[in-house]
Amino acid sequence: MGDMAKHIPVCVKYRKKIFGGKLYDYVWRPDENGNPSTSPMRKILVNGIAYMLNNRNVLLAYNPSNGWGSYDSFLQWLISYKEACEDNPGRKISVDR
């Protein structure tokens, strides 16, 4: 779903800081993009989810041909991620690669 996320622009302002770029940068590499906590990440995810809902037909072209994921499963995962951010405001997000 990384390829799809690379085609989803996001731009949000949170406490005088602008978080902009591609959804991929924040979902897969938050540590390299200002390491937003769950509060700004929630806004980033809402922005990305809105883009997905408004551009479904364009984004369907990025469904993986191998069947590993889909627009619908990615959207549901992002919604769950947003809800986790809502349930844990102000928490640090960490990644492990």
Image: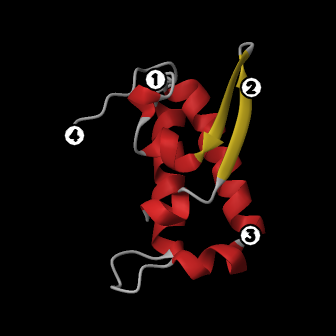
Q: At 67% from the left edge and 35% from the top edge, which residue is drawn?
A: 20
Give the Cα distance between marks 4 and 2.
28 Å
Q: Name the residue under label 3.
A: 55
Q: Name the residue under label 4.
A: 97
Q: Position of residue 39 (x, y in %)?
A: 57, 25
Q: Earlier in the sequence, mark 1 or mark 3?
A: 1
Residue 83 appears in the rendering:
no
Q: Earlier in the sequence, mark 4 or mark 1?
A: 1
In the displayed structure, 56 sits above or below 30; it is: below
Q: At 44% from the left edge and 32% from the top edge, which residue is drawn?
A: 30
Q: Where is residue 71 in the image (x, y as percent from the top left)?
A: 53, 74
Classed neighbour count for the residue bearing mark 3: other residues with Cα under 10 Å, few (<14), some (14–19), many (≥20): few
Q: Where is residue 95 in the image (x, y as percent from the top left)?
A: 30, 34
Give the Cα distance between marks 4 and 1.
15 Å
Give the Cα distance between marks 3 and 2.
22 Å
Q: Mark 1 points at which residue?
A: 35
Q: Earlier in the sequence, mark 1 or mark 2?
A: 2
Q: Indicate the amino acid at tag 1.
A: Asn
Horizontal side of residue 1 vs 52, given as left or right: left
Q: Earlier in the sequence, mark 4 or mark 3?
A: 3
Image quadrant in which the C terminus is located = top left
Q: Name the residue under label 2.
A: 13
Give the Cα distance between marks 1 and 2.
14 Å
**In front: 31, or 90?**
31
